[in-house]
Image (cartoon, helix red, strand yellow):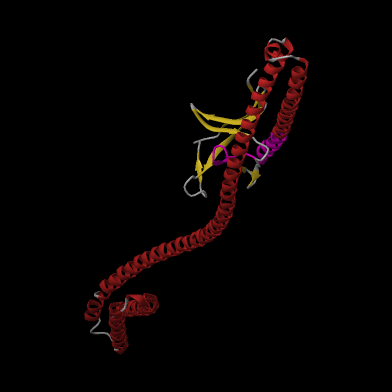
């Protein structure tokens, strides 16, 4: 049957930096398929992941391996044969839990397979040793029953025993050779496992540093957010101040327009005041009452001159000037009314004369 997939998921694959043994190096640009495979012929389990045509994970699971969850969505394990540490980043915590549970299940299955293999090797070794010990006694029996070497060499049972003995000796030698080889591999795996454990501890330490850096970045981010809020409030205040300035500018323009209107009114008053000398020339022959009216008119002209000087000195006092002009207009209207009355009186006097 060969290898068959027994579990499949998707994750981002990382490997520990071989130089620093601290930083993670992305092995895939995006989430890729990560699968557990079972080889029924060898009775072994592997984790395999392929990105396009590149194999980025090919890890045979052994009972000594441990899958460590370093965060809610990230886990890692050390592979002594590949001399590296693999890391997987999942999209959710549920996917991580399923992968971790499957890793533990496969790890237990690999342990059972190793135990069974060791039992078979021990049984085969014991059987070979027992066969090796029984062979000399059989040869002794054959020698005792025979009369000479020629007789022994031509006995069929003796030839079969020798052949079996040679085969068992070869099996024992192969078993011893395999045992030595397994011991050498085991020692190498232990040394590699120790190095990987050191790398794993360094990786865990770097994870703590990353967490501390992430917390510091989070605090800095919060401070920046607060600063942004303060700047937004300041911008709002600046906008409000701009609106107030615009309103004040509009108000100043309105006041300037009103001031121009008042100046136009004053000019009209000046033009009307130019008629007063003509009226005085016509009223030279009037009575003392007319002279008193002319004196009052002179005083009014003095007030007008004083008001004109105040207008030239300061345009900001246009409100006070308006009041004075109003008073002057009222007085002038009264005087004009008086002049009209005087004129009417004079007319009546002329008619009477």
> Where residue 331 appears, x then y in whole percent?
37, 80
Could you tell me which quadrant the N terminus lies in? top right
State whether residue 257 is above or below residue 335.
above
Q: Which residues are magenta?
A: 79-108
Q: Position of residue 256 (x, y in %)?
A: 34, 67
Residue 195 appears in the picture as rendered: yes
Q: Nearer the viewer, residue 287 or 46?
A: 46
Residue 329: image quadrant is bottom left
Asked whether residue 219 is drawn in magenta, I would say no
The answer to whether 17 is drawn above or below residue 277 in the figure is above
**Of residues 39 and 281, the one drawn nearer to the viewer in this rendering:** 39
**Image height check: is 217 above or below 263?**
above
Q: Position of residue 46 (x, y in %)?
A: 62, 30
Front residue of 261/159: it is: 159
Q: Tell me the residue at 55%/54% (across/down).
A: 214
Q: Is residue 341 left or right of residue 66?
A: left
x and y percent of residue 71 in the render? 63, 47
Residue 42 appears in the rendering? no
Q: Residue at x 69, y 34 (%)?
A: 102
Q: Nearer the viewer, residue 340 or 43?
A: 43
Q: Is residue 160 above or below residue 183?
A: above
Quadrant assignment for the C terminus: bottom left
């Amino acid at each position: 049957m060969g290898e068959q997939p027994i579990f499949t998921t998707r994750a981002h694959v990382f490997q520990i930096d071989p130089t620093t043994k601290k930083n993670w190096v992305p092995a895939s640009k995006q989430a890729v398929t990560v699968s557990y495979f079972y080889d029924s012929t060898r009775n072994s389990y592997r984790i395999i992941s392929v990105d396009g045509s590149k194999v980025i994970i090919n890890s045979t699971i052994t009972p000594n391996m441990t899958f460590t969850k370093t965060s809610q969505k990230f886990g890692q394990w050390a592979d002594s044969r590949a001399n590296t540490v693999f890391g997987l980043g999942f999209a959710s915590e549920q996917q991580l839990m399923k992968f971790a549970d499957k890793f533990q299940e496969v790890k237990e299955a690999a342990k059972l397979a190793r135990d069974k293999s060791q039992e078979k090797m021990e049984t085969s070794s014991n059987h070979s040793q027992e066969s090796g010990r029984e062979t000399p006694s059989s040869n002794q029996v054959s020698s005792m029953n025979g009369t000479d070497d020629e007789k022994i060499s031509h006995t069929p049972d003796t030839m079969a025993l020798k052949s079996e003995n040679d085969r068992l000796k070869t099996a024992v030698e192969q078993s011893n050779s395999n045992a030595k080889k397994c011991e050498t591999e085991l020692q190498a795996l232990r040394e590699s496992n120790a190095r990987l454990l050191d790398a794993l501890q360094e990786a865990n330490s770097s994870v703590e540093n990353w967490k501390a850096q992430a917390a510091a970045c989070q605090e800095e981010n919060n401070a920046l957010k607060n600063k942004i809020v303060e700047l937004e409030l300041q911008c709002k205040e600046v906008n409000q101040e701009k609106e107030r300035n615009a309103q004040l500018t509009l108000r100043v323009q309105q006041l300037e327009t009103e001031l121009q209107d008042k100046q136009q009114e004053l000019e009209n008053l000046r033009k009307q005041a130019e008629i007063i000398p003509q009226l005085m020339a016509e009223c030279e022959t009037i009575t003392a009452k007319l002279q008193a009216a002319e004196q009052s008119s002179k005083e009014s002209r003095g007030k007008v001159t004083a008001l004109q000087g105040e207008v030239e000195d300061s345009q900001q006092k246009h409100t006070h000037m308006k009041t004075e002009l109003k008073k002057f207009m009222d007085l002038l209207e009264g005087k004009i009314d008086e002049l009209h009355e005087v004129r009417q009186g004079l007319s009546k006097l002329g008619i009477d004369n």
